[in-house]
Image (cartoon, rainbow, N blue to C red):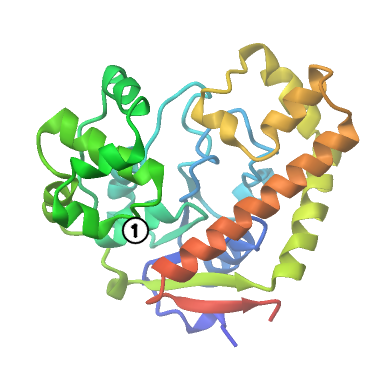
């Protein structure tokens, strides 16, 4: 059984896992046991006005250990793995060891495997790609890129086409230029939570009800005048559903159930991603 006390002093800690699996509680336990600064690696907890709905640490947790990269991006801000990597870099060399926790796998991969900065795709190129059939997109790609992506995944194929169209270089070439990682996995204690599905589904439902009790609907009401479904922050699980309720498009009971289903589906995608991409991480089965 895993014991936080077994982690070597001052060794960086990485904690990944699906939503509602208890990552933040584990990070706090490790920080209180052996010290460290807790650093967010969740792509939605970085936004400043969705605090309850994204399960950001509350004031009690913030008082127990230092926390970084929570709620530091405006609700209409753009943010990517590249932004996060630049933000986290100076925190890796501080006096306190980093305890990096979250559910965004791409952040962890960028940190431990490196990330190449590919120029963003102009909107006109994306619009052009949207009009092209999948087989025609595939036909333009080089063999190396085609060997590395799921050719049945329209989004992945279109992204590779857009990179080639925008930069004149195949995606595979960009990937081959990936810089060394900021924190190689062998230099850290890397933990991935593997919860029982039924156990996690029950936690997801109970947590959303707690969020409602804590004022998630009031949070959505305050954000509603600035609501834009195109914002990255609008992808917060439960946000579209609560906004739809406030607009009179569904009852609160319907919004609650839709948000719970969306959260469970998101957790399923996370579990699959972690299982496929984090084979070198130490798994922690839940409940213990």
Farthest top residue?
Answer: 225
Above or below 224: residue 176? below
Identify the residue under disc 1: 109
x and y percentages locating residue 147 in the rendered image: 23, 60
Which image quarter holds the N terminus? Answer: bottom right
| Along the line of sight, the residue nearer the viewer: 176 or 224 | 176
x and y percentages locating residue 72 in the rendered image: 47, 32
x and y percentages locating residue 243 in the rendered image: 73, 24
The structure residue drawn at horizontal position 42% and vertical position 71%, both measured from the top left corner, is: 190
| SS of the residue under disc 1 | helix
| Along the line of sight, the residue nearer the viewer: 8 or 167 | 167
Side of 132 relative to 66 (left or right): left
Counting every numbered tag in the picture gives: 1
| Along the line of sight, the residue nearer the viewer: 155 or 176 | 155
Quadrant hosting residue 95 = bottom left
Which image quarter holds the C terminus? Answer: bottom right
Quadrant hosting residue 120 = top left
The structure residue drawn at horizontal position 49% and vertical position 24%, both measured from the top left corner, is: 74
Above or below 205: residue 226? above
Side of 279 relative to 195 (left or right): left
């Amino acid at each position: 059984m895993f014991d936080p006390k077994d982690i070597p002093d001052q060794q960086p800690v990485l904690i990944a896992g699906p939503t509602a699996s208890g990552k933040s509680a584990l990070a706090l336990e490790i920080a209180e046991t052996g010290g460290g600064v807790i650093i967010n690696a969740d792509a939605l907890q970085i936004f400043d006005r969705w605090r309850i709905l994204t399960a950001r640490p509350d004031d009690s947790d913030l008082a127990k250990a230092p926390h970084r990269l929570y709620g530091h991006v405006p609700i209409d801000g753009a943010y990517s793995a590249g932004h996060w990597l630049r933000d986290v870099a100076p925190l890796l060399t501080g006096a306190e060891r980093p305890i990096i926790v979250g559910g965004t796998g791409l952040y962890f991969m960028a940190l431990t495997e490196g990330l190449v900065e590919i120029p963003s795709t102009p909107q006109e190129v994306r619009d052009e790609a949207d009009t092209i059939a999948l087989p025609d997109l595939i036909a333009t790609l080089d063999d190396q890129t085609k060997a590395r992506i799921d050719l049945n995944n329209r989004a992945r194929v279109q992204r590779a086409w857009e990179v080639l169209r925008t930069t004149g270089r195949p995606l595979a070439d960009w990937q081959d230029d990936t810089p060394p990682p900021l924190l190689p996995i062998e230099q850290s204690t890397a933990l991935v939570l593997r919860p029982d599905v039924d156990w996690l589904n029950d936690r997801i439902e109970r947590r959303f009800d707690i969020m409602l009790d804590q004022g998630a609907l009031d949070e959505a009401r305050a954000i509603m005048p600035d609501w834009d479904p195109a914002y990255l922050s609008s992808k917060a699980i439960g946000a579209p559903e609560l906004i739809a309720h406030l607009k009179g498009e569904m009852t609160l009971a319907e919004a609650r159930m839709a948000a719970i289903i969306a959260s469970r589906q998101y957790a399923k995608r996370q579990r699959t991603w972690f299982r496929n991409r984090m084979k070198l991480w130490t798994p922690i089965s839940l409940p213990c």
